Image (cartoon, rainbow, N blue to C red):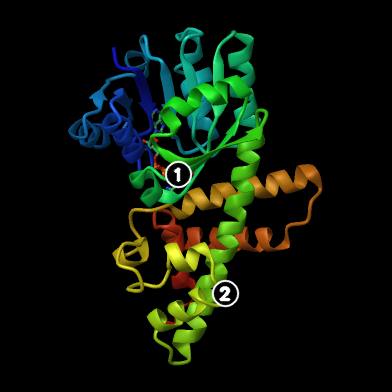
C-alpha cells in the first residue's frame, strides 16, 4: 500500500508541495478551510477531506503549511486537537514559519504524548515549491528528521537538520530577515538606476555579474518586466505575501529582543514592510516593496 500523507494548508506553498507528493506516488489527503483551494487540489490528485479529523485517519505522515502560530496551535493543540487523534506511527512535519515558542510547544506536547513531530520551515518560494527544490530547515530529534526525509526529498533539494526544537525556526527567521534586507536594497538600487536613465534589465544584468549580485536580484527580481516569471511581472501576485514577511520580521525582532542582539537593518526592514503593509499591500508579493521607491 502507498505511504499516506495528510496535508494541511493548500495555499501558495502547500498546494504545489502536496502536488509533488502525489506525483511521487504517495496517497495524499488534503484539508484547507477555503473550498476553492480544496477543489483545485482535487484536480491535482489530492483526496479532498471535509474535516481535519477525516484527513488524519491511519496516515503515515502529516504535513502542515499554515500561516501563523494560532493556525498551527489551533489545529494540533487547542481546537481541532489533532495530537489527541493520532498514534506514534504517524510523524507530524510542520513546515509553517512560526515562533520558536509555538513550535517548541507543539513538539513538546507531541513528546509528552509519546508522539513524533518535527518543525521543517522552508525557503525557496512558490517557484521552489512547484519545482520541488525547497530547502527544509528542520528542528527536532535526529531520528524523526531522518524519517521525514522519505517525503521531504520529493518536495525539496536540501534538507538541513539545524538542531533541537526551535532551531529550524531560528534558522528560517535569520534567513528571512536577510532576504527582506536584500530585497529592499535591490529595489532601492534598481529605482536609483531607472531614475537616472538606466534600463532595469541592463542594470540587473550588470549587477548580477558584479559585487551587488544577490538572490532577490537574480532569482526574484522586484522590477516589473525584468524577469517574465516573477511576481513583479504579474502585478505582484502569486508569491510570498507582504503580511507574511511582516510576520517573519516580527519574529526576528522577538528573537533579537530575547537574545539582546542588535539588528538595526532587520528593525528598519520590519518598519518599511510594516508601512508598506499599512498602505494596503498586505496581499501583494513582498517584492512589491519596489513600489515604495517609484515616483508616482
Ligand atoms: P497562504 O496564505 O497562501 O496559505 C496558507 C493556507 O493555510 C491558506 O490556504 C489557509 O486557508 C490555510 N489554513 C489556515 N488554517 C488552516 C487549518 N487549520 N487547516 C488547514 N489549512 C489552514 O500562505 P503561503 O504563502 O502558502 O505560506 C504558508 C507558510 O509558508 C507561512 O508560514 C509562510 O510564512 C511560509 N512560507 C511562505 C513562502 C512563500 O513564498 N509564499 C516561502 C517560505 C515560507
Q: In the rendering, at what x and y percent does residue 28 appear?
A: 30, 24
Q: Nearer the viewer, residue 49 or 160?
A: 160
Q: CA distance from mark 2 to mark 1?
A: 24 Å
The vertical placement of 290 against 102, above or below, is below
- The x and y percentages for residue 263 are 73, 57
Look at the numbered disc 1 and say if its residue's Cβ is closer than 8 Å to ligand 1: yes
Q: Residue at (35%, 62%) from the top-left corner?
A: 230
Residue density around tag 2, few if under 14, some if 14–19, many if 20 or more, within 10 Å:
some
Classify the position of ligand 1 by quadrant: top left, top right, bottom left or bottom right.
top left
Q: Tell me what residue is drawn at x 28 percent, y 30 percent.
A: 22
Q: Where in the figure is residue 141, as x and y percent of width and height?
A: 63, 22
Residue situated in front as seen by the camera: 238 or 123: 123
The residue nearer to you, when weighing 178 against 25, is: 25
Q: Which mark is on residue 212?
A: 2
**Above or below for 120 versus 281:** above
Say the numbered circle drawn on residue 134.
1
Question: Could you tell me residue 239's position as x and y percent?
Answer: 38, 53
Q: Mark 2: which secondary structure?
A: loop
Whether residue 249 is visible: no
Q: Determine the secondary structure under disc 1.
A: strand
The quarter of the picture where the N terminus appears is top left
Amino acid at each position: 500500500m502507498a505511504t499516506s500523507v495528510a496535508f494541511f494548508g493548500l495555499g501558495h506553498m502547500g498546494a504545489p508541495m502536496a502536488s509533488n507528493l502525489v506525483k511521487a506516488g504517495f496517497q495524499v489527503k488534503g484539508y484547507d478551510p477555503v473550498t476553492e483551494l480544496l477543489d483545485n487540489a482535487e484536480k491535482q490528485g489530492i483526496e479532498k477531506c471535509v474535516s481535519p479529523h477525516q484527513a488524519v485517519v491511519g496516515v503515515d505522515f502529516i504535513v502542515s503549511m499554515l500561516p501563523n502560530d494560532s493556525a498551527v496551535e489551533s489545529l494540533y493543540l487547542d481546537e481541532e486537537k489533532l495530537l489527541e487523534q493520532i498514534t506514534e506511527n504517524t510523524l507530524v512535519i510542520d513546515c509553517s514559519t512560526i515562533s520558536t515558542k509555538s513550535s517548541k510547544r507543539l513538539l513538546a506536547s507531541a513528546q509528552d504524548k509519546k508522539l513524533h513531530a518535527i518543525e521543517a520551515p522552508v525557503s525557496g518560494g512558490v517557484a521552489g515549491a512547484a519545482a520541488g527544490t525547497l530547502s527544509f530547515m528542520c528542528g527536532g530529534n535526529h531520528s524523526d528528521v531522518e524519517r521525514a526525509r522519505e517525503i521531504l526529498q520529493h518536495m525539496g533539494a536540501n534538507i538541513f537538520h539545524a538542531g533541537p526544537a526551535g532551531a529550524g525556526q531560528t534558522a528560517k527567521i535569520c534567513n528571512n530577515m536577510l532576504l527582506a534586507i536584500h530585497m529592499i536594497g535591490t529595489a532601492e538600487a534598481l529605482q536609483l538606476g531607472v531614475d537616472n536613465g538606466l534600463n532595469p534589465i541592463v542594470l540587473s544584468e550588470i549587477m548580477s555579474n558584479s559585487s551587488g549580485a544577490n538572490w532577490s536580484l537574480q532569482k526574484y527580481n522586484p522590477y516589473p518586466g525584468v524577469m517574465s516569471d516573477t511576481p513583479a511581472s504579474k502585478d505582484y501576485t502569486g508569491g510570498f505575501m507582504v503580511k507574511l514577511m511582516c510576520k517573519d520580521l516580527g519574529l526576528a525582532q522577538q528573537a533579537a529582543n530575547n537574545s539582546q542582539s542588535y539588528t538595526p537593518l532587520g528593525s528598519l526592514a520590519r518598519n518599511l514592510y510594516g508601512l508598506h503593509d499599512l498602505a494596503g499591500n498586505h496581499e501583494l508579493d513582498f517584492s512589491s516593496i519596489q513600489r515604495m521607491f517609484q515616483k508616482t
